[in-house]
Image (tube, rainbow, N blue to C red):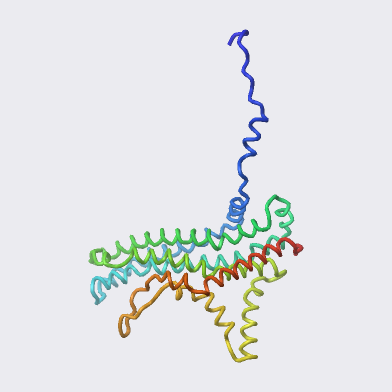
């Protein structure tokens, strides 16, 4: 470059700044990420459950082969017995995720008031509605997806282990091809989705108790329903409240699947019942109750003082 040539002007810093400021902040997304950073048990606990189950399957693989070899049943029955453990692993992982969801909901809004960190978080440009929605998204969206992915991967690994065990027992995996494995995986995905919707009011209740109770949210969350059940039973001799809570906690699968009896002493494979589940008034009433409880969480977080 010669002296006669003009020096190119540098890009002013004020031109680059508006481009950076124009990017959306996405407070909801970052609030969800914050929950994942602060609560690693959301994905660590299901991973540990899957690891323990896989280790148990590897240890038991030696004795399962001789047991299948001497089992007096048809090839398909022995294949069905060999491929039963993957579905037990699904229950272990999903049950672990359910326990994590309960304790997360009880502590999500309670812990930030107990350690007074809510004073810092409320100073940020994040509304109470966004904060509560991000916390509710963990048990209603993030944790079901995480546990489902871990369960599916574990299911496929155990399926491969069982295929190897089946071959060592002198059986060809052709009998396993007649098993409705893909249908059962689809039922697993559908079951997790429907149970999450069915348990939505329970998760919202735990969040509300967490933000309301000053001490021991676990005792308040379970003690109030138990006390109401005992009072109703003693005072009126009925158990409407107890059946309601029990149905809400355990009745989701009964509404989502249709089990038919194929004959005396036999039960066929459950069938997906979309109409029965989404046409159930209890589902929509529960979702409305969940929305009302979450609105209560927003109100309490906004106006209640730290513990």
Q: Residue at x 41, y 60 (%)?
A: 152
Quadrant where the image shows the N terminus: top right
Q: Is residue 221 above or below residue 111?
A: below
Quadrant where the image shows the C terminus: bottom right
Residue 185 appears at what percent x and percent y?
Answer: 38, 64
Occupied quadrant, residue 220: bottom right
Give 185 or 190, whichever is nearer the viewer: 190
Please tell me how many numbered marks the rendered image carries.
Answer: 0
**Is 116 situated left or right of 56 in this image?**
right
Occupied quadrant, residue 76: bottom left
Q: Is residue 26 above or below residue 272?
A: above
Q: Is residue 262 above or below residue 185?
A: below
**Is 99 situated left or right of 263 in this image?**
right
Residue 227 appears at what percent x and percent y?
Answer: 65, 82
Q: Residue at x 41, y 73 (%)?
A: 257
Residue 255 appears at what percent x and percent y?
Answer: 46, 74
Q: Is residue 141 above or below residue 277?
A: above
Q: Residue furthest right?
A: 305
Q: Residue at x 44, y 73 (%)?
A: 276
Residue 169 appears at what percent x and percent y?
Answer: 25, 67
């Amino acid at each position: 470059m010669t002296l006669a040539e003009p020096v190119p002007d540098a890009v002013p810093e004020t031109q680059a700044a508006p481009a950076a400021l124009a990017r959306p902040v996405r407070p909801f997304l970052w609030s969800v990420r914050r929950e994942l950073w602060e609560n690693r048990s959301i994905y660590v606990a299901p991973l540990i459950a899957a690891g323990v189950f896989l280790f148990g399957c590897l240890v038991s693989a030696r004795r399962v082969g001789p047991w299948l070899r001497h089992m007096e049943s048809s090839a398909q029955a022995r294949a069905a017995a060999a491929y039963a453990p993957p579905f037990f692993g699904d229950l272990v992982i999903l049950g672990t995720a359910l326990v994590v969801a309960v304790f997360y909901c009880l502590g999500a809004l309670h812990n930030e008031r107990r350690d007074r960190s809510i004073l810092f978080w409320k100073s940020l440009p994040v509304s109470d509605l966004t904060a509560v929605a991000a916390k509710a998204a963990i048990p209603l969206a993030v944790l079901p997806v995480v546990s489902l992915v871990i369960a599916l991967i574990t299911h496929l690994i155990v399926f491969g282990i069982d295929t190897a065990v089946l071959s060592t027992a002198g059986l060809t995996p052709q009998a396993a091809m007649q098993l409705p494995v893909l249908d059962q995986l689809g039922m697993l995905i559908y079951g997790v989705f429907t149970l999450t919707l069915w348990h939505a009011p329970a998760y919202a209740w735990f969040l509300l108790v967490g933000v309301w109770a000053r001490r021991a949210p676990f005792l308040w969350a379970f003690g109030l329903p138990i006390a109401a059940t005992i009072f109703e039973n003693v005072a009126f001799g009925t158990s409407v409240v107890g059946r309601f809570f029990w149905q809400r906690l355990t009745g989701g699968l009964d509404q989502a699947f249709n089990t038919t009896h194929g004959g005396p002493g036999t039960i066929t494979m459950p069938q997906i019942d979309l109409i029965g589940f989404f046409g159930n008034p209890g589902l929509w009433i529960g979702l409305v109750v969940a929305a009302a409880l979450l609105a209560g969480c927003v109100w309490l977080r906004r106006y209640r003082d730290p513990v």
